[in-house]
Structure formats: C-alpha cells, structure tokens
Amino acid sequence: MRFDIVTIFPEFFGALDVSLLGKARQAGVIEVGLHDLRDFTHDRHRTVDDTPYGGGAGMVMKPEPWGEALDSVVREDSVIVVPSPAGHPFTQREARELSTREHLVFACGRYEGIDQRVIDHYADRNEVREISLGDYVLNGGEVAAMAIIEAVGRLVPGVVGNPASLTEESHEDGLLEYPSYTKPALWRERAVPAVLLSGHHGAVAQWRHEQQLERTRRVRPDLLSPDLLSTDGSGEST
Ligand code: ADE
C-alpha cells in the first residue's frame, strides 16, 4: 500500500520513520511519498494562500498549487483523503476499509481550508473523502493525516506482527477494550483480578466481555446497541 501526502509541513511526518510503520516502510510493506505543496508554486514567495472571496476571517489555500501537486501523485485507483473538521467522523470501520485500498493521497489543508473547487474537481475523477478526527479544530490536516495513516497502516497485513492483537482491541467488536494487567500480581496493594489468575479460559472470556460492556456503558453509551447486550461473550443476544 502507498500513502502520498501533500502538505506545507513535510517535517510533521518524520514520525513515520519510527515504530511499527517505520519498520513496515523499511520492509517495503508500505510506501510513503512526501510532497511539499510550495514546490508547486511559481512565485518568489511560494504563495499557497489568499483572502477568501466574499470576505471573512482567515486565508484560503489557492487551487493552482493543489491542482499541480495532486496531478503529480493521483492515479486512477487513488482515494484522496482531505482531513477536515467539516468531514465525516473517522471510525475503525473506515480505517479497515481504507486498509484494503492500494493508494491513499492525503491533502493536508491549513488556514480556513482548501478552495472547494479542488475537492470538486478531483471528486469527478476519484473517490474523495473529507474526514474529521473529531469535533474539535486542529491547526491543519497534518496531525489528522498522521492519525489516519497510523490507524489504516497498522491494519495492512504484515505491519503488526500478531494479527490476533488487531481483533481484540477497542472498537473492533463495537465495544471498548477490557482492562489489561501484567506481573506483578500485587502492586501498591492493588491485586490483579483473581479470575485472570484462575487459568479458567471460559471464566476469563466472560469476565473480559462483562468488563467491555461495563466500560462501554459508562464511558461510551452511544456505542451500545441492543444486540451487544448479551453477557456470555459470544456476541449473541440472549
Ligand atoms: N483539520 C483541522 N481540524 C481537523 C479535525 N478535527 N479533523 C481532521 N482534520 C482537521
């Protein structure tokens, strides 16, 4: 899988050299291309923004550099991702879906965003997704793109060593993850729950499922649908 990223801050993406994604890049499992939007300007000041038509606060990113930059990376099979607080909310489901695509192009806007015609132009040719990380505003799309790339990249086969760890985590089954413990069994007078030391796999599975439900009810009741309210760990309704 290949990620191409267009941004005025390529240095934001240095973190893609480290950890699991860094290793996956070295192994050739994923490829990353970084493109400085200012390389596609032609004036002395390398201008990427201008004042908005109709007035208002802030600056808007000019369409011409975006057109040249995206023309240089977009292929027929590319999905273009535009991180934006005005996009639809990003979910694990979408991460999984994007992880099956061959080529993602990230258009990282700054200021008040990118001239809308850029998005409309590419939407006529490619799949364009405006994706929001959450209901808050970042200074630009870079941090959101990093988060999306990490969420998608780790689902690409071969990136995470033990694929089982991908299915047993928050959001994969619609619930938050159960709490985890490791040695020592007693730390600062806090004991690991006895059931986890029992060696009884059925009891452990049931306890973990109950913990998932309890945590999800408490922290994220919006995630719960009636189908998930069984307590036997099977995922079946009772
Ligand atoms: N750019 C600025 N804020 C954002 C957000 N919440 N999600 C995605 N991209 C953004």
Image (cartoon, grey):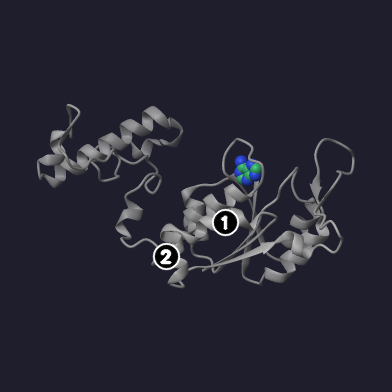
Query: Is 227 displayed left or right of 191 in the figure?
Result: right
Give the number of the disc on residue 74: none
Task: Determine the secondary structure under disc 1.
Answer: helix
Give the number of the disc on residue 13: 1
What percent of the width, then of the height, locates residue 50?
85, 48
What percent of the width, then of the height, locates residue 203?
15, 40
- Please tell me whether residue 185 is drawn above or below residue 160 in the rendered image: above
Q: Nearer the viewer, residue 93 or 228?
A: 93
Residue at position x 85%, y 36% in the image: 56
Residue at position x 89%, y 38% in the image: 55
Query: Is 139 displayed left or right of 231 in the figure?
Result: right
Q: Amino acid at mark 1?
A: Phe
Q: Is residue 123 visible?
A: no
Residue denoted by label 2: 23
Query: Is 171 displayed left or right of 9 in the figure?
Result: left
Of pointers 2 and 1, the one earlier in the residue sequence:
1
Q: Residues within 10 Å of mark 1 (few under 14, many from 20)?
A: some
What percent of the width, then of the height, locates residue 1?
51, 69
Q: Is residue 158 visible?
A: yes
Task: Determine the secondary structure under disc 2.
Answer: helix
Query: Is 25 displayed left or right of 172 in the figure?
Result: right
What percent of the width, then of the height, locates residue 212?
31, 37
- Please tell me whether residue 19 is drawn above or below residue 78 in the rendered image: above
Toward which corner of the image does residue 67 lie, by quadrant? bottom right
Q: Amino acid at mark 2?
A: Lys
Q: Quadrant of the C terminus?
A: top left
